[in-house]
Image (cartoon, coloured by chain):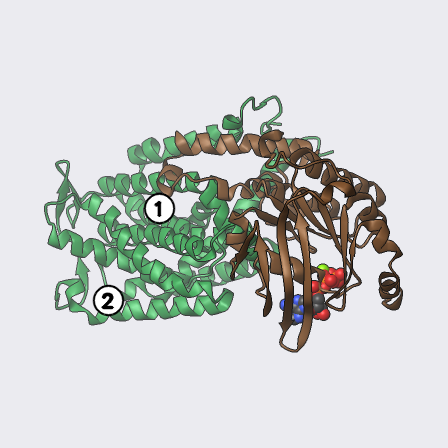
Chain colours: A green, B brown
Amino acid sequence: MFYREAGQFKTSYKADQALMPILQDRVGLLVILAVAFVVIPVFANDFFLTSIMIPFLVFSLAAIGLNVLTGFCGQLSLGTGAFMGVGAYAAYKLTSIFPDANVILMVLLSGVFSAAIGAVFGLPSLRIKGLYLAVTTLAAQFFLEWCFIRIPWLYNYNASGAIEIPHREAFGVVVSGAEATPIVRYFIVLGITALIAYLMANVLRGRIGRSWMMIRDMDIAAELMGIRPLQTKLMAFAVSSYICGVAGAMMVFFWLNAAEPSSYSISLSFQILFMVILGGLGSLSGAFMGAAFIWILPVFLKFIPGTIGINVAAETVEHITFMVVGALIIFFLIVEPHGFARLWQIAKQKLRVWPFPY
Amino acid sequence: MNAFATDMTAAPDGVSETAHREELLRVDNVSLSFGGVKAITDISFDILKGEIRAIIGPNGAGKTSMLNVINGFYHPQEGTITWRGKERRKMKPYEAASQGIARTFQNVALFKGMTTLDNIMSGRSLKMHRSFFWQVIWRGPAEREEIEHRRKVEDIIDFLEIQAIRKTPVGRLPYGLQKRVELGRALAMEPDLLLLDEPMAGMNLEEKEDMSRFILDVNQEFGTTIALIEHDMGVVMDLSDRVVVLDYGKKIADGPPEEVQANQNVIDAYLGVSH
Ligand SMILES: Nc1ncnc2c1ncn2[C@@H]1O[C@H](COP(=O)(O)OP(=O)(O)OP(=O)(O)O)[C@@H](O)[C@H]1O
Ligand SMILES: [Mg+2]
């Protein structure tokens, strides 16, 4: 009863194709934005920002990136970690070469490099599909990781082999390096993630988003309707890798402060993939839900038992997380490939008819 | 609705008129084989502007393969295809699409994860040009373009009487409606030549009547040329101006429906092959 479109008639196509045609959804989004931009900054402590919110947002953005490619365009990729790494190393090199340039801009620019590399590794997608394509992206993952280790220029010949994020200021505040405060980092990460999510929502509801979904759902029919498969897939690879690259750069600049090649390994690829699967293939809001679940569940398991006086060992937490996530992934793959996002829709559908389901 | 009327030269159906009509497509001596299997052997026929051209024949006769040749999905080993007076070389399906050839499929090939509306909107892909930059910004040119095409799509939705399922994911629709949405998607391309591969297969009588009416309306109101594969002889007799009959990949008859129906080769072919 509280959630329904009854009485909300659309008098123009413009209103009907808005991102959220239903009033309750718009209100919900406004509430979420208010919480994210006002409530959390006012009330949250540094631990909550640094250990929960910032990584959650970074992973959400990466999950959006992978979702563009896998959820919307139907091309499975296991190279997400490496594409994120490309963004991180590119941003690091950019800020080393141009120390005076605004580092936020450099982070946004770094995605261009991962987009180019993503497009190159997307070339085989014209000929191969599904699992075989996943294997070529796996090759990209290993090749790029190898580059991160073997090309010392990428990490400025640092003896440790790691990249360490330098002190940078923008608009008079410290934005990166050890002195940057959590609240500043949080606002940057939140701003970039929200902006890219909004822009992607635009792309996905228009011609280009549709062309990706056409390729995903029935590539032969798509081609017979004038879609060029190679261009369309390469664009999905490029856009996806751009977003992943920015997420990877944010990961090291505004969260970790330092990164090694192993930070961008295959396990990161899988982590993001699991977020996409749990959240829902082909759903932007699902990317946030999946990231929240996979990132916050272990934190919960770690701290909640402690607060009620039960002692749980760190390994136990890890094992429980593995089991829960694994079980859920199997469940979702079999029962509900559209993940949490779809469950949420079903719940909304139930709310719409509640309390009289018939 | 005349938004997608493309060809005003089309005259109402009638066999006598076909003689004066301009040729839209011609295939000459086309042969196609898959490894050892000869799907099409030395077939020639033409399709005139504004007509409904039926392609019939028993199962496995090569009808679908013929459509696949016409829209560039298969490349014949021999023979030529002349499209609007120009002989055309190997052509990719998306090139055929951009030259005005649209089709529906024997087994519905809709975009299952998308709504009816998005499926039909996808037919407008070739006519929408706003770049990625404008799409990202959305407000302004991209949104205006989307609305402009949405109007045309809504015309098609009204025409096909599928307003109620506009926002339904097509995977959940019954088969008959899926076929209708697929027709809508092809119409959205405003094609010059519309290839329909068994648009009424698996439909009940009422659905067949609806579909026949839509096909006739498309042909007569918008002047769209149609190549129609259909097994139901009653439908073929009612709708088509001329019929070409295939059997085992060869052409065995070609002419007006009554003439073809009386042709002994055709009768033998249909009696000889049980369905
Ligand atoms: N991709 C392919 N590979 C191999 N053989 C094929 C292929 N496509 C069609 N064929 C063969 O070509 C012949 C003609 O097939 P086609 O699908 O064109 O027949 P049809 O007239 O459409 O039949 P139906 O009425 O059953 O749809 C058949 O023998 C079929 O097995
Ligand atoms: Mg067939």
* Disc 1: host chain: A
Q: Which residue is drawn at the image coordinates 32% and 44% (left, top)?
A: A48
Q: Which residue is drawn at the image coordinates 47% and 31% (left, top)?
A: A28
As rendered, which of A45 and B60 lies closer to the eye? B60
Quarter of the rendering occupied by the N terminus of chain A: top right
Q: Which residue is drawn at the image coordinates 32% and 31% (left, top)?
A: A38
Q: Which mark is residue A148?
A: 2
Give ligand 1's quarter of the image: bottom right
Marks 1 and 2 sit apart, C-alpha to C-alpha, by: 24 Å
Describe residue A315's horizontal placement relative to residue B230 as left or right. Answer: left
Q: Which quadrant holds residue A9?
A: top right
Describe residue A20's horizontal placement relative to residue B69 as left or right. Answer: left
Describe residue B13's horizontal placement relative to residue A62 as left or right. Answer: right
Residue A116 at x, y percent in the picture: 30, 57
As rendered, which of B137 and B99 lies closer to the eye? B99
| Residue kind at label 1, given as amino acid type | Leu
Q: Which residue is mark 1?
A: A57
Q: Return the disc, 1 or 2, that comes first in the chain's sequence.
A: 1
Residue B1 at x, y percent in the picture: 63, 29
| Residue kind at label 2, given as amino acid type | Phe
As rendered, which of A136 and A254 lies closer to the eye? A136
